[in-house]
Amino acid sequence: MSCFLGIDVGTSSLKAMAIDERGNIAGLASSPYSILCRRNGYAEQEPAIWWEALKKAVTLVTAQLKGTGKRIAAIGFSGQMHGTVLLDREYQVIRPAIIHCDARTGEEVEEIRAILGSDIERILMNPIAPGIMLPTLLWLKKRETESLERAAYALLPKDYLRFRITGEIGTDYSDASATLAFDLRKGKWAEEILEKLKLPKEIFPPCKDSIQIAGSVTEEAARELGLEQGIPVVLGGGDQAMQSIGCGAVTEGEATVNIGSGGQVCVQADRPEGNIALGLNTFQGYGRERWYVMGATTNSGSSLKWLNQLLGQTDYEAMNREVEQIRPGCDGLVFLPYLSGERCPRMNADISGVFWGLSFLTDKARMTRAVMEGVAFALYSCLEACEKAGTRIASMTALGGGSRSGPWLQMQADIFNRELRTTCHQEQAVFGAAVAAAVGTGHFDDVPSACREMIRYKDTVIEPDPKIHRLYEEYYGIYKEIYEKGKETLVAVTRLGRR
């Protein structure tokens, strides 16, 4: 029986998953790695570490397939978005990859805004932010001139690994559209923008749909990975596009809410509908004619991870039980999850987080629930921004760590006042990459038909409680008021702490 291998190059680990034609998981493995922080605000990773993680994860998955009669028929990719991998003319990595959570390019962001002006909305259709390829390349031009001068190719993280497997340079529309170097209306690299910023045009790879075949496993890669030579490899896409496939949200109005390290609300659209003023991103989906609008919050799961480390909480089942005993609103405790700035709709890199309403009643359980609610409020702001932009939301699927915690899932439903469904499988991005591989090699006619066959949802739908939603609306008003009235102070204390 044929199965399809998905590979997801994440921020903290690489995952590999094999699924069969009915969507059953036949093998799953991950290999962790860390972020290099050479200076405050820097976030880098060595591409060689990704390759070693890929070898480990694929070896584990193929071991799980032995004796099952299943063979890998195609491979697809998903990956962390926005990052920059530079290769020279000999296809060698020039320097560590600068990834999406890097914050060094504040000056370059302001410079781009000043130079481009209205072209940002007219051509790029996305707000300028640190960690994304365009400002990163401008930083390299100014601070590491030799590195950029040596560069023959600028690749996204997943595209580097796919090159290592196939020997072919390329990218897909979903990842290209999220570099800020892509003309979304014309569907090609934004040469006009690159000329204004005096950046090289020739380093950007050719673009295709996510489900198109990029190449096949080379003899050398087959030997290193323990795979058959000649297995077709599809391009795949950025993790948000593949995650949407992995939960079946692939037609207009279908939305996802994801709580990973960061958090995102993504809504599928038939045409671009974003709004820069609201801090929304507009990116292409798995094909040239597919789009999604995204509101992203910087700190979601990372906020809870921070608190758990601070409080020494390691028993998550006990944590969830304790949180369920706390009333919605935590008896007057509100948390703003701006631990490293905020994106949608604030677009404020210097804002700091805060607990508001501390009292002698405050304990670990209340602080934990307040963090969960604060993250859900931040995502609610993203949801509101999507709706203000005119995006229709017909259904919503919850993903990530926030979908694995019963109390947190209920908080999201109550705060959003929306039904939430969840998939029977976890790790939707790598699952989506495997689905893309199946479609790209002709095992299904298109992505929607593959999703109907391969993706299953849990029977239980999380229903919102209207009474609790009304209470949360009051707390949400306070949440917004704390920011609006206190943002200057919250920025000032951040800047003071950096002196």
Image (spheres, rainbow, N blue to C red):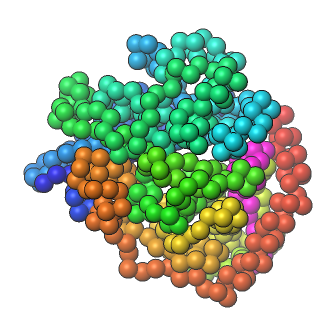
Side of 452 relative to 363 (left or right): left
Q: Residue furthest bottom?
A: 467
Number of numbered discs visible in the structure rendering: 0
**Which residue is pictured at 65% across the width and 75% down the height?**
415
Q: Position of residue 369 (x, y in %)?
A: 64, 70
Query: Which residues, given as a range, are shown in magenta?
Result: 331-350
Front in this rendered view, residue 222 or 454: 454
Side of 385 relative to 423 (left or right): right
Identify the main secondary structure in magenta. Answer: loop
Front in this rendered view, residue 310 or 329: 329
Does residue 136 sit above or below 24 in this rendering?
above
Side of 448 relative to 476 (left or right): left
**Which residue is pictured at 72% across the width and 83% down the height?**
470
Residue 171, quarter of picture? top left
Does residue 186 sit above or below 65 in this rendering?
above
Residue 94 visible, this angle:
no
Does residue 110 sit above or below 375 in this rendering?
above
Residue 477, quarter of picture? bottom right
Residue 476, quarter of picture? bottom right
Q: Position of residue 186 (x, y in %)?
A: 56, 39
Front in this rendered view, residue 459 or 66: 459
Q: Position of residue 412 (x, y in %)?
A: 59, 72
Q: Position of residue 392 (x, y in %)?
A: 59, 68
**Which residue is pictured at 22% across the width and 58% down the height?**
21
Which quadrant is home to the C terminus?
top right
